[in-house]
Amino acid sequence: FAGDSGDGMQLTGDRFTSETASFGNDLSTLPNFPAEIRAPAGTLPGVSSFQLHFADHDILTPGDAPNVLVAMNPAALKANVGDLPRGAEIIVDTDEFTKRAMQKVGYETSPLEDGSLDGYSLHPVPLTTLTVEALKEFDLSRKEAERSKNMFALGLLSWMYHRPTEGTEQFLKQKFAKKPQIAEANIAAFRAGWNFGETTEDFAVSYEVAPAATAFPVGTYRNISGNLALAYGLIAASHQADLPLFLGSYPITPASDILHELSRHKNFGVRTFQAEDEIAGIGAALGAAFGGSLAVTTTSGPGVALKSETIGLAVSLELPLLVVDIQRGGPSTGLPTKTEQADLLQAMYGRNGEAPVPVVAPRTPADCFDAALEAARIALAYRTPVMLLSDGYLANGSEPWRIPEIDELPDLRVQFAQGPNHTLDDGTEVFWPYKRDPHTLARPWAVPGTPGLEHRIGGIEKEDGSGNISYAPANHDRMVRLRQAKIGGIDVPDIEVDDPDHATALVLGWGSTYGPITAAVRRLRRAGIPIAQAHLRHLNPFPGNLGEVLRSYDKVVIPEMNLGQLATLIRAKYLV
């Protein structure tokens, strides 16, 4: 679905997706919209689109060759026609193909008449006129009636693909509950689109895509986006840790949805604070961690840059803190609504001094739930800030998610310090804030106000054990090495390799490249070419068996959405 950024394409795509999910298909989505609040109408930068790939079997990507394009204006056609395979169906709103609108995007002649679309199955439909006609019994202005043309298009596509309709009608009644006339008008437009498909002779074929019954383990499923899954994962982590959840955040694309969602869940003990800027957001979160909360701050790459000093403070204080970076295209403001996974080196090294931080990356929208739990496990057990690297593609994309049973979730409970933990030479029992657990090297977590546990806090280097301020070179060297050893010693599972044919080449990925890589690997194997695949969730520290795995292949290929950041780290560490 593609149109102007005011045409309701995201809502149309969301509704088609929801009905497809409830029908039981596997699916993957790619919402795509301008970064500007209101890009110029009718222009190529102003095109908003929603791509959906659904099937009766397991799929992993939104695809790169849509079989159907619904183009609401000339700009939408021009921006997307290059992706279509020959023979694809193009549905256009002919009412929008005026001379001025076509000239705006560089069409000298009408593409609907000049033969340039002869290789496609073209369906010229006066969508706007048909919508206005269908709504003439309602007391609406022409402009108000035209706003429902996206529902006409949704009705037509729902007929074409035998999608259920009850959910959308129910959704429209709820969305416009305070404006029942608008609700009824949208439902009427939706039904008119369905009936147009049923009665017109223009569409010779409709399609049935059966539920993906064999693709999924048995369970209760829902459609979920990455940001929603991440928000639910954070709530589940706070429940499993038996700690209140605190989010200190500043709105930034594409992370803001997590703040919106968590603000709805005060019933789970969630506190959300919309700060005045990025630095205040993480400062409040670190304060909440000091106070005994599961603390989170959410942002994107530009925000991580501003938060870096406080992340370093969290490293020095050795307190648990989740820093969620929903990556976007950069540098600077860059491409706020487009995806890039180019913050890996920033996550690894983007702080002053030796300030090691664990890095965890989810691989699909649904996997954001598990990644949030894993990041919380590491932060709480090892008393460290943890970077969780999602991205815009995962954040806004969606797929079916099996809702887990509570007893499948990990136990994340940790003990707060209760009393003295060290005996001085003279026999006095005292509390040492930097005395370490021998297994994890984590320091005790002492909640302020606990009698006898008063201790100094701040960013100046601490003396090992006592936590007193220290400028001694030997102590600083010891603290630097201890903090590094704590991160290096984090218990992460071995990397699993999928290699059914004993290949000589391995494709290694991280984050959201999982879907495209897996789809490509499947394609190669179907062509009889042996290829191995492995995917990293833990980027710092790397899994213990990674070096051995890499050295067992003649060639390692690392596709990533940057100029080779993981490849740089892998080469540096393993010399492969």
Image (cartoon, rainbow, N blue to C red):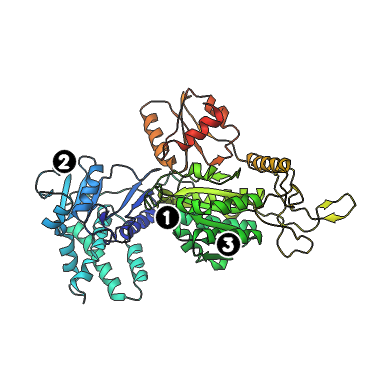
Rendered position, 240 above or below 83: below
- In which image quadrant can residue 484 be found? top right
Q: Earlier in the sequence, mark 3 or mark 2?
A: 2
User: How many labels were placed on the picture?
Assistant: 3
Rendered position, 352 above or below 16: above
User: For the point 57% across and 51% down, which residue is it?
Assistant: 311
Residue 568 spot, x, y in % from top left: 49, 33
Between the C-alphas of marks 2 and 1, the distance is 37 Å
Between the C-alphas of marks 3 and 2, the distance is 58 Å
Crowdedness of circle 2 by 10 Å Cα count: few (<14), some, many (20+)?
few
* Residue 254 numbered tag: 1
Q: Please state which amino acid type lies under the numbered disc 2.
A: Gly
Whether residue 365 is visible to the viewer of this picture, yes or no, is: no
User: For the point 76% across and 60% down, which residue is it?
Assistant: 453
Mark 1 secondary-structure assignment: loop
* Camera-nearest residue between 312 and 551: 312
- The residue pinned by badge 2 equals 119
Q: Earlier in the sequence, mark 1 or mark 3?
A: 1
**Mark nearer the viewer, 3 or 2:** 3
* Camera-nearest residue between 225 and 350: 350
Say whether marks 2 and 1 touch (CB < 8 Å): no
* Residue 284 numbered tag: 3
Q: Earlier in the sequence, mark 2 or mark 1?
A: 2
Mark 2 secondary-structure assignment: loop
Q: Please state which amino acid type lies under the numbered disc 3.
A: Ala
Say whether marks 1 and 3 touch (CB < 8 Å): no
